[in-house]
Protein backbone atom coordinates (compact mmCIF):
# COMPACT_ATOMS: atom_id res chain seq x y z
CA UNK A 1 0.00 0.00 0.00
CA UNK A 2 1.09 3.61 -0.56
CA UNK A 3 2.56 5.83 2.10
CA UNK A 4 -0.31 7.76 3.82
CA UNK A 5 1.70 10.98 3.73
CA UNK A 6 1.98 10.70 -0.08
CA UNK A 7 -1.80 10.31 -0.45
CA UNK A 8 -2.90 13.26 1.73
CA UNK A 9 -1.25 16.47 0.50
CA UNK A 10 -2.92 19.26 2.51
CA UNK A 11 -6.02 20.05 4.49
CA UNK A 12 -8.24 22.67 2.85
CA UNK A 13 -9.13 25.27 5.45
CA UNK A 14 -11.70 27.55 3.84
CA UNK A 15 -14.97 29.12 4.90
CA UNK A 16 -16.98 26.40 3.17
CA UNK A 17 -14.85 23.64 4.70
CA UNK A 18 -15.34 25.19 8.14
CA UNK A 19 -19.10 25.13 7.67
CA UNK A 20 -18.95 21.44 6.70
CA UNK A 21 -16.92 20.69 9.81
CA UNK A 22 -19.36 22.45 12.12
CA UNK A 23 -22.55 21.03 10.61
CA UNK A 24 -21.69 17.54 9.37
CA UNK A 25 -18.34 16.57 10.97
CA UNK A 26 -16.73 16.55 7.49
CA UNK A 27 -13.18 17.60 6.65
CA UNK A 28 -11.79 18.59 3.25
CA UNK A 29 -8.37 17.48 1.99
CA UNK A 30 -6.34 17.92 -1.18
CA UNK A 31 -5.22 14.42 -2.16
CA UNK A 32 -3.15 12.66 -4.80
CA UNK A 33 -4.97 12.47 -8.14
CA UNK A 34 -4.67 8.69 -8.41
CA UNK A 35 -5.84 7.96 -4.84
CA UNK A 36 -8.99 5.87 -4.39
CA UNK A 37 -11.57 6.25 -1.64
CA UNK A 38 -10.12 3.25 0.20
CA UNK A 39 -6.60 4.72 -0.02
CA UNK A 40 -7.85 8.01 1.43
CA UNK A 41 -9.73 6.25 4.24
CA UNK A 42 -6.64 4.22 5.13
CA UNK A 43 -4.42 7.33 5.08
CA UNK A 44 -6.71 9.38 7.35
CA UNK A 45 -7.03 6.51 9.83
CA UNK A 46 -3.25 5.99 9.89
CA UNK A 47 -2.24 9.66 10.15
CA UNK A 48 -4.88 10.96 12.58
CA UNK A 49 -5.89 7.68 14.33
CA UNK A 50 -9.62 8.43 13.83
CA UNK A 51 -12.44 6.29 12.42
CA UNK A 52 -13.76 7.32 9.00
CA UNK A 53 -17.45 6.85 8.18
CA UNK A 54 -17.42 7.92 4.50
CA UNK A 55 -15.21 9.45 1.81
CA UNK A 56 -16.49 11.50 -1.13
CA UNK A 57 -14.10 12.58 -3.89
CA UNK A 58 -14.22 14.99 -6.80
CA UNK A 59 -11.80 16.26 -9.40
CA UNK A 60 -11.26 19.99 -9.64
CA UNK A 61 -10.20 21.14 -13.09
CA UNK A 62 -7.54 23.82 -13.37
CA UNK A 63 -8.59 27.28 -14.47
CA UNK A 64 -7.27 29.06 -17.55
CA UNK A 65 -4.99 31.95 -16.68
CA UNK A 66 -3.89 34.74 -18.99
CA UNK A 67 -1.04 37.10 -18.27
CA UNK A 68 -0.99 40.19 -20.53
CA UNK A 69 -0.54 38.16 -23.71
CA UNK A 70 -2.77 36.40 -26.19
CA UNK A 71 -1.54 32.99 -25.09
CA UNK A 72 -2.74 31.50 -21.84
CA UNK A 73 -1.65 28.88 -19.36
CA UNK A 74 -3.56 26.65 -17.04
CA UNK A 75 -3.52 26.02 -13.31
CA UNK A 76 -3.03 22.34 -12.45
CA UNK A 77 -6.03 20.08 -11.89
CA UNK A 78 -6.31 18.40 -8.49
CA UNK A 79 -8.46 16.01 -6.49
CA UNK A 80 -10.51 16.93 -3.43
CA UNK A 81 -11.68 14.49 -0.75
CA UNK A 82 -14.48 15.21 1.71
CA UNK A 83 -14.01 12.87 4.68
CA UNK A 84 -16.85 12.22 7.14
CA UNK A 85 -15.73 11.02 10.55
CA UNK A 86 -17.79 8.79 12.83
CA UNK A 87 -19.87 10.41 15.57
CA UNK A 88 -17.78 11.67 18.48
CA UNK A 89 -14.55 11.94 16.44
CA UNK A 90 -12.88 15.33 15.84
CA UNK A 91 -9.69 16.50 14.12
CA UNK A 92 -7.49 19.32 15.39
CA UNK A 93 -6.18 20.88 12.16
CA UNK A 94 -5.27 24.35 13.46
Image (cartoon, helix red, strand yellow):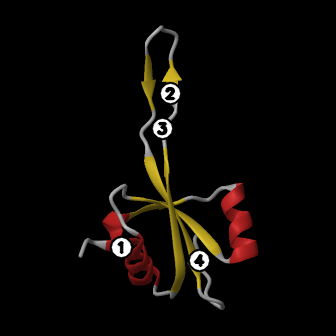
> Label 1 belongs to which residue?
39
Q: Position of residue 94 (x, y in %)?
A: 60, 68
The residue most toward the bottom is: 88
Q: Position of residue 2 (x, y in %)?
A: 25, 71
Answer with the quarter of the image where residue 4 lies.
bottom left
Does the CB distance between marks 3 and 2 fall below 8 Å? yes
* Residues at marks 2 and 4, CA–CA distance in whole angstroms: 31 Å
Q: Position of residue 39 (x, y in %)?
A: 36, 73
Residue at disc 4, secondary structure: strand
* Residues at marks 2 and 1, CA–CA distance in whole angstroms: 30 Å
Does the CB distance between marks 2 and 4 fall below 8 Å? no
> Label 4 belongs to which residue?
84
Could you tell which of marks 4 and 3 lies nearer the N-terminus?
3
Could you tell which of marks 1 and 4 lies nearer the N-terminus?
1
> Label 3 belongs to which residue?
62
Q: What residue lies at 37% left-to-right and 55% top-to-bottom?
A: 33
Q: What residue lies at 38% left-to-right and 80% top-to-bottom?
A: 42
* Residues at marks 1 and 4, CA–CA distance in whole angstroms: 15 Å
Amino acid sequence: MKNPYDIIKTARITEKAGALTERHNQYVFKVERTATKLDIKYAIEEIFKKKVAAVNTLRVTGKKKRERTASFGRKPSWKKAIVTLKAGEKLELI
